[in-house]
Structure formats: structure tokens, C-alpha cells
Amino acid sequence: MTKLIISSSLFQSQISDLLPCNNFKKSQLTYSLLNAMSLLECFDHVITNPYCSQEEMMKFHSKEYINTIMNPRYNNIMPYDEGNESKWNELNEMAKQWYDLNNIEAPEGRSHSRLALYERFKELSVETNRPSHEVSIPTSKKRSAWEALLDESNSTTEEPVNKRAEKENSNDNEKEMIREKLKGYNLEGDCPIFSYLPVYCQVIVGATLSLAKHITAVANERTIAVNWDGGRHHALRNKASGFCYINDIVLLIQQLRSNGYKRITYIDFDLHHGDGVQRSFQYSTSVQTISAHMFEPGFFPCTGSLKESKMGKNIVNIPLLHGVDDMLMNEIVEKVMIPCVKRYDPEILVIQCGGDGLIGDGYAEWQLTIHGLVNNILKLLRIFPGCPVVLLGGGGYNETVMSRFYTYLTWKIVDEYSNKKSLKKPFQAKEERIHDKDRSIKGYQLDDRHTDDILITDHELIEAYREEHYKFWIYEQEGSSKRKNLRNDNGETSEVIKKLRNFYSLDD
């Protein structure tokens, strides 16, 4: 028997989309499509109001770092961000128009401003008796140096030159100290302080950690737990990195170890190396880290070489070049990843399902298909049937590609493992195309990409897919304007696999 758990809600998705690289829509598009296709109904339990305390974050991150990024004053619209409220509301307006057009009363729960979303967070905190000191805004009327720093570039108020100079001089030293502190924590560049950062951290990290509470070692019961908003694999103990502020993966693995799991395998499919997770468990005998990623000079985070694999206990790095396709990734999973996992013999799997290697992603470095990546992830679930599995999100910078990816992966999971029988079959190839005898062939897989007439399910955010003609598989159809073929710089697949198998002594 398999128990399916997911952390997903409109509230969580709007919180997740506070993250600048989500472009105010990545998570909401995914949630809305999952909901429209009734996939959430197929889970045994849906977590809708996750939360993580600062104390829980400090089980990995330093107190000083957490106190900095969790400053309650950041639960405001940052000065540089004030002009983005209309962009934040684009999906809200899209949803409203759809409900009006279809003469449907809009359901409650959608926050129509970031301030309203924050107020909702505080309401839920009161309802669940969370520590109020972590969600309130200080009432001190004294203007801090940090506030002065925030307002510095946005100030339009004219005042006497001598008075302004005196005020600036009095705060210069303190502001410089704050700048250096933020720089030391890398809270700039790709990881700036953004509006409502503390709330984002508490909800999204809470979503991942809440999964651990539902994973129990019960005989004849397997748990598959999902949080598509998690997977922030770059964050370090004292530093934000690569759009990642809190490393929910490390915190989850630590919690799983506390719960009694002695051998945990972490697998990372993101285009970028899972450096934060690897570094955290580099010398651990209880955690195996596997990462297949792009490794070229200057490509972030510039780690993950084969050489690094020898600098720890259970590190498996699979460095790859530009142009990785399904054929190569299939071979890597079957002939490198799976043998390495089997040799380690884990009790539980944690899989980071980054989608920035997919066709259509903004990076345009790899050319994996949704269909291919999903099937490779499912291979791991099938070949280790006794292992509970935690599936987390990750990178992905084309929001409509990512919503397709996580929706299709979710559908495949519930189609294969859900105990609920009312599941729709939106991707199922037409029965008349498949002969009964073909189904009995061992290893036969329906190629859902050939169901070319599948359209995105009509729902409140359907217009986000207008430029893609509402087609689900448009990025994978041969001849489609959205499908770009890249040069594969990795060379012969057989040679790549031979090199990796030799390095990890898989032919012994």
C-alpha cells in the first residue's frame, strides 16, 4: 500500500511566488493546473497551511544568518519593489476575467495584494497558535539604519542641506556595516532581500519539513511525499546562493535522520549542481548525494566535478556538458545512478526534480523532454519499491513549462500509486491506438506525446498558455516552433557512460 502526501494550496503557491525568480507566477500556474485536473483529490493527505519556525531553521543555518533574513521589518514591500504590485496582480486579474466570463463565483482564498497575503499569513498564524513574535511588525517608532538604507535611493523628500548632511553622516558608519553584513551573507545580486522574505521562508521550508511528519516506518506501507515549491539546494549554512535562502533539503534530511533513517540517498536532476546539499553531508556515512548537472567553466555554481566525488564519503557527481538529451539521461539513470543507489542500499530517497534542463527553459542548455525526465524519475520510484520517497521542486525558468512538468509528473505518480479510483485519464492515449497484445509486452510504455490533440485543461489561468496555443506537448512536438534542437557537446553516449562507470567502479 502506498500513501500519497502533498503540500500544495493557493496560499502556499502565492507565498512561493514572492520569490523573484518565480516571476510572480511559477507556483500559481502549477497549483491551478493540478487543481483543475483534480489531481490533489487523489492524495491521501494535502497540507495546505505549512509553517516553519526560526528555531527549526537554526538546526542547520547559523543563528546570526537566520536573525538577519528573518528580520520582521522585511515583511513589507521593499522600496525597490513598490512598482511591481501590478505585475503581482496579473494572475489575479486573469483569474477574475475567467470567472466573470464563465459566470462562476470566484472561490475564496486568492489574495489580491502582497499585503493581503501577509495578513492572511498572520490570520493563519493566530488560528494555529503560532508564535506571534515571528509574524508581527515591530512597533518601535525609531527609524533604524536598515530602514534608512532601504529608503536611501528612493527618497524624494527635500530638506535643508545641512540637516540632511548631518543625518547622513550619523548613519553612514552603521549603514556601511549593514551593507557589509548583507554582502557577507550574499543577500545581494541573485539573492536580494525581497518583499516578505521571512514569510516566504517560513511557509516554503515548512512545506518541506511537514512532509517528514507523515513519513512513518509502517510495515507494508510506503509513503511518497511531494512539495513542488521546495528543493532549494544551493543555500549554505551562512549564505544565500542561487535564488536559495534556506536549504529545506538539508533540514529535511536532518529531520529524517532524527526520525531514525540511517541511510538516505539524495538525487538531484537540476541543471545546476546540488552544491549546498553535497557540502552539508560531504563526510556523512548516512547520506549519499547524487547530482547530474551541467559542468562547464563559469557555469554556476562551478562545482560538482568528478574529482570532488573523491573528497567525501558518498558523493556521486555526474558532470555533463551542453546539449544533454533524453537518450543520454536515460543511460545515466539506468547505468550510473541506479547502480550507485543499489550499492548504497538506502532506506529512503529524496529527489530534487529541477526542470531547468527541459526544452523551452530560459537557460536553453539541455534538451530534455518532460516525458523523458518524468519517466527517469519514475524509474527510481519503481526500482526501489520498499523506499519511501520525497519529491521536491527545483530550478525552472519557463513558468508554463514547469507547470506542465510538475502536473504531468504528479499525474503519473497518482495514476500508478493512488488508492483512489476516481482519477481522470487526461494523458491516456486513445484506446483504439493500442492493441491489447501490445500492453502485455514487458516494459511497454504509452507514449503520451503522441496524443497531440491534448490541450491544457480549461481553468482560471488558461490564458497564460495562449501564446503556446493551449497545447500541452507543444515543446515536444516535432516541427513545433517551441522545440529547439541543440548541439550535444557530450560526445558518444557509450563513451560518457563508460567513463562514469569506470570512475565509480560499477563494472567490478
Image (spheres, grey):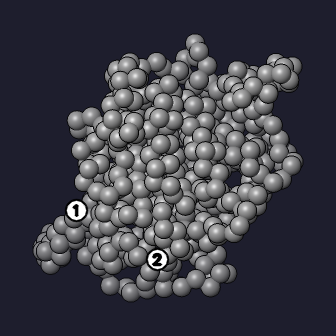
Residue 345 in the image, given as x and y percentages of width and height? 50, 55
Residue at the image point whose x is 61% and y is 36% from the top: 375
Q: Which mark is residue 139?
A: none
Report the amino acid beneath label 2: Glu
Q: Where residue 156 sits: x, y (%)?
A: 30, 61
Q: Residues within 10 Å of mark 1 (few under 14, many from 20)?
A: some
Q: Is residue 237 visible?
A: yes
Distance from disc 1 to disc 2, alpha carbons, whole Å, reads: 24 Å
Q: Residue 319 occupies which quadrant of the picture?
A: top left
Of tags 1 and 2, which is closer to the observer?
A: 2
> What amino acid is labelled 1 in the image?
Lys
Mark 1 and mark 2 in contact? Answer it, CB < 8 Å.
no
- Circle 2 residue: 56
**Considering only vertical position in the picture, is 93 above or below 348?**
above
Give the crowd class for mark 2: few <14, some 14-19, many >=20 residues within 10 Å.
some
Q: Is mark 2 on a helix, strand or loop?
A: helix
- The residue indicated by pointer 1 is 183
